[in-house]
Image (cartoon, rainbow, N blue to C red):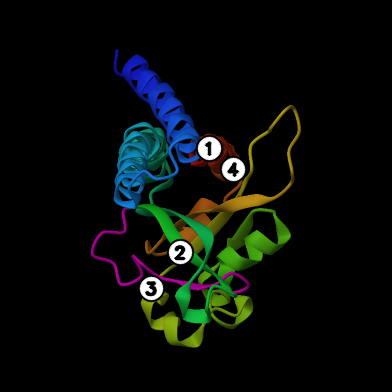
Amino acid sequence: MRVWLLAVIRAILATGSYVLGASLQIVPGMALWLYLGLGILVAGITFVIEYLTNIRPTRHWREVVPVIIDEITTSFVDFLRATVGVQPRMHIMVPRRTWRWCWVRRYFVMWWSRGMENQPDVNITFPIGQGVVGECYRQKIPIYAPPEALGEGYRFPRHLRPLTRDLQAIICYPIYEPRQRGHQSGRLIGVLTLDSKTPNAYTRLTSDVHLPSINQSMERIAIVVSQIYH
């Protein structure tokens, strides 16, 4: 019912705008304040309609997305804990332009996370060409990083290293843009990351027994996330 009502209001606004424009020609002496008042009224009603049809649904969707991703990652997290024997953390990093560099330079920001509550790197931000995440984004392939390679090996910013010094393993998986009209652009949306502070986590995660299942699960999650993100 509300959809039909909004459609009718749009039609009235379109007609009203036409009538207002025509009246300028027919009655040129009409008071200026009346034109301004009608114009402001039309603009206000248009904004309300746009808010109801586009802005508010988008806000609600953004609130639901983390819950959906939590749900689709639950079985994978349970597998990592019970079978692999690690305490996992997961997050999704996406590139954004920030005010810090006048929106010229792009940085990775955290779009979603799980298991990172009360962690020093929960809202970490760094240039897209740096870190294990940056290497995955550049090469567009999964990257498996042991603890000894998390510093100098991937040019991770020195001032941020104390925040991640306890990590024992990082696995990054690229998130590609979804198919559109049967084709993929080959561009990346962001990077899905699995890491852990569990001792010997890298050996456990990359073992021949567990790595195939981990790759399969991360690919599945990345595909679903690409559909949700767009």
Where is residue 80 shown, x and y percent of the image? 41, 44
What residue do we see at 51% from left, 82% from top? 157
What is the tally of numbered marks visible in this picture?
A: 4
Q: Dot 4 corresponds to which residue?
A: 215
How far is the residue under mark 2 from the one under mark 4? 23 Å
Asked whether the residues under the numbered discs 1 and 4 touch, taking CB atoms below 8 Å apart as contact, a structural biologist would say: yes
How far is the residue under mark 2 from the one under mark 1? 23 Å
What residue do we see at 53% from left, 37% from top? 217
Work out which quarter of the rendered image holds the N terminus and state it.
top left
How far is the residue under mark 3 from the one under mark 1? 25 Å
Identify the magenta region: 115-130
The magenta stretch spans residue 125: yes
Residue at the farthest left position: 118
Where is residue 51 shown, x and y percent of the image? 33, 39
Q: Dot 1 corresponds to which residue?
A: 217
Where is residue 146 shown, x and y percent of the image? 55, 67
The amino acid sitting under disc 1 is Ser
Neighbor class of circle 4 (other Cα within 10 Å; few <14, some 14-19, many 20+) is: some
Q: Dot 2 corresponds to which residue?
A: 109
> What is the chief secondary structure element of the magenta stretch?
loop
Q: Dot 3 corresponds to which residue?
A: 166
Q: Which numbered disc flags the more N-terminal residue, 2 or 4?
A: 2
How far is the residue under mark 3 from the one under mark 2? 20 Å
